[in-house]
Image (cartoon, helix red, strand yellow):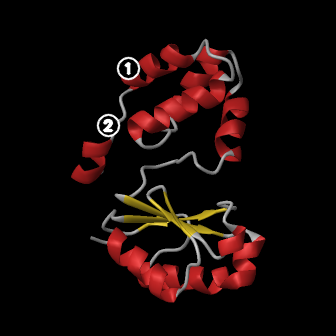
Amino acid sequence: MTAVYEARHEPWDETRGAEIIAEHASQEGATLVVLHALQKAFGYVPEAAIPMVAQALNLSRAEVHGVFTFYHDFRHKPAGRHVLKLCRAEACQAAGGDALAARAEARLGVSLGNTTADDRVTLEPIYCLGLCATAPSAMLDGRLVGRLDEKRLDALMAEAQR
């Protein structure tokens, strides 16, 4: 990973992963809690962590994998320095979201769900930001943006590429 990634998150370490799992294993709804804690520490949930979580919580690997894949915010690999999420829900699509998504893919040179080669921007679909009245919408690094148009999208991408 890049130095940018390493500065924001710990590098994957099995011992540290086991500590995080043990720290949260007794909480209610532990599967989600543990997966979120791992992602917060490492920036993603390493594949090697899935069987560790399963063993600690007395679940099958399939059960943990099922939870991991059901929730779209869990990552298989680290995100870029900035994460640009474009709403793909029906209201945003009806308001021009498809064209904006295509524009972002073309300008960034990646398809939805991928990260630019320089690790600066991860472009992700998200299924409803709750801004239907101001569709189409996006989120850059947790900041919501409604009434997205080409100009606003271009500004978001320029900000993310700095």
Q: Secondary structure at mark 2?
A: loop
- On the rendered image, what quadrant is the C terminus found in? bottom left
Which residue is denoted by mark 2 in the rendering?
11
Give the amino acid at mark 2.
Answer: Pro
- Is 142 situated above or below 37? below
Residue labelled with disc 1: 15
Image check: 114 left or right of 30? left
Q: Nearer the viewer, residue 72 or 143?
A: 143
Q: Quadrant of residue 155?
A: bottom left
For this orientation, the residue located farthest to the left is 3
Is residue 2 something one can see in this rendering?
no
Specify whether residue 86 is in view.
yes
Residue at screen point 30% across, 49% down:
5
Disc 2 crowd rating (10 Å Cα; few below 14, some 14-19, many 20+) is: some
Residue 114 place in picture, x, y as percent: 49, 65
Q: Position of residue 107 (x, y in %)?
A: 43, 84
In the displayed structure image, the side of residue 37 where residue 10 appears, left or right: left
Q: Secondary structure at mark 1?
A: helix
Question: Do callouts 2 and 1 mark residues in contact (Cβ within 8 Å)?
Answer: no
Question: Which percent across, then down, holds residue 112?
Answer: 56, 70
Q: Residue at x 47, y 81 (%)?
A: 152
